[in-house]
Image: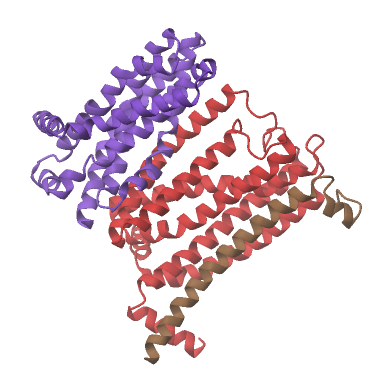
Amino acid sequence: MGLVRLQFQREWRLLARARSEALNPLVFLIMTVTLFALALDGQAQALSRYAAGIFWVLVLLSSLLSLDGMFRRDFEDGSLEQILLLAEVPFLPIIGKMLAQWAATGLPVVLMSPLLGTVLQLPPEALGPLAGALLVGTPTVSMLGAVGAALVVGVRRGGALLGLLVLPLYIPVLIFGTAAVNGLAAGTGGVAQIYWLAAMSVLAVTLAPFAVHAALKISLENG
Amino acid sequence: MNGLKTLWHRLGSPRWFYQMMKPWQTGLGFVALVALLVGTVWGLAFAPEDYQQGNSFRIIYVHVPMVVLAQSAYMMLGSAGFVLLVWRMKMADVAMVAIVPVGMTVTAIGLFSGAVWGRPTWGTWWEWTDARLVSTLVLLFLYVGLYALREAIPRAESAGRACAVLAVVGLINIPIIKYSVEWWTTLHQGATFTATRMSMPIEMAAPLIVNIIGAYCLFGYLVLLNMRTELLRRERDTKWVGALRTEVIDGV
Amino acid sequence: MAFDSLGEFLAMGRHGLYVWLAYGVSVGSVVALVVAIRARNANIWQRLDEEESD
């Protein structure tokens, strides 16, 4: 557990130093939400009807921005190799890294979501469900995305490829996430979808570190 | 047990595989041709017309086998990826290389025929409330991702193992994707007509079963053909390929 | 036979265009795939021959 915490703290310090790297995806999300609100201006009803879906799509897209660089810096300066070689149980630091990634990108989105939801004309009763669905859904996004990021870390211009690899895998999160928000806000159910999101996150947190570990080893051999 | 072990080791030998699979390839190709011909002619000309959909329903004799095959092919891809990661068996990588283009083609045919079937049936080429079409589309994305990843990584061995990781992750995800899509489409009051009904009379179902069997044989033929070609490419500088060449030249 | 004449068979009720389009594209794609793989195969043999004669 110590290794996980150490790696988490290291990541956190690095992110604090390179603040723009961590904040850019969030700024991107805020801007695209604004663009949607402007594009659909004057049609508040239409906007509020589709806001949950729009917001989820934007969250998935903005996650790609932060995931792309997740392993790249460590890969290029060699510290990734050190981590994999020196740690007795290499996926403990990997878990630490993935958790830090989520805390730096997923969590701020959850915290900002009531504000951004309001901008998108979501009714007040939908804001709670939105934050809740994001809280249990974004870990899956971070975990699956980390697998993709680990696979393309050695590839030149891997960013575009990353979207191609992970966006299809995000589809269940998008479906359940949107349905949960809409269902809970309208009072027509949606609790089951929250459970689904949570179950997927548990599954992803359990299995993804293994896949990331395997993928990083392959990428290092290649590089 | 010993026999199984020998088979396992032999499966790893390119030369053995190349030679032993030739009759299988020919046989499967022949059975596929016959079954698909029988099933298709039967389905097109002899099966009774559907009282609601008219003759457009005859498209299901190509659509359903291809969609079923598209999913099975991905299952095999994931299994091959698992074998490659756990036992580092090179033949599994050859299998993956061979299955991806075949699976992609089959999935694309399934999608296209589904859209063409949907036009006269629903009055639209694409229906987002049909679970089968939507999950086939997602499947196509997964195939495209695998193809793109292999293209992007220059070193062949790394590319193979990276694809294996992605294929296994996809394999775990497919049931969840399928379930979510099915749930989502029923929420939106699913399409009134679906390609298959449980209550399909036997005169309609029989050609479909023949074509599904034929499609699996076709898949076997295509994958073996592609695997043997890939083996040839990888092993082109070895002795056994050289020996094979003289045999071909001598007309043996 | 579900049809009385060849013309009726080709017309497929009002759905001839759709049925034949679906079958045509499907058969065409599979044939194209087979041809592509076989061409690759032949290409490998041919290149081996050329290297031999060099």
Look at the picture and state if A171 lies above or below A150: above
Give left or right: position of A151 versus B208: left
Residue A203 visible in the picture: no
State the residue at coordinates (43%, 84%).
B245
Q: Which chain is red?
A: B
Give left or right: position of A216 versus B151: left
Give left or right: position of A108 versus B215: left
Colour given to chain A in the rendered image:
purple
Give left or right: position of B213 versus A153: right
Where residue B4 sits, quadrant-wise, is bottom left
Q: Which chain is brown?
A: C
Query: Residue A144: percent from the left, percent from the top?
Result: 33, 36
State the residue at coordinates (21%, 42%).
A71
State the residue at coordinates (48%, 65%).
B226
Where residue A197 sits, quadrant-wise, is top left
Look at the picture and state if A89 lies above or below B217: above
Query: Residue A218: percent from the left, percent from the top?
Result: 24, 52
Name the residue at the right extreme. C4
Residue C5 visible in the picture: yes
Q: Say which quadrant the N terminus of chain B sits in.
A: bottom left
Query: Residue A14: percent from the left, percent from the top?
Result: 12, 34
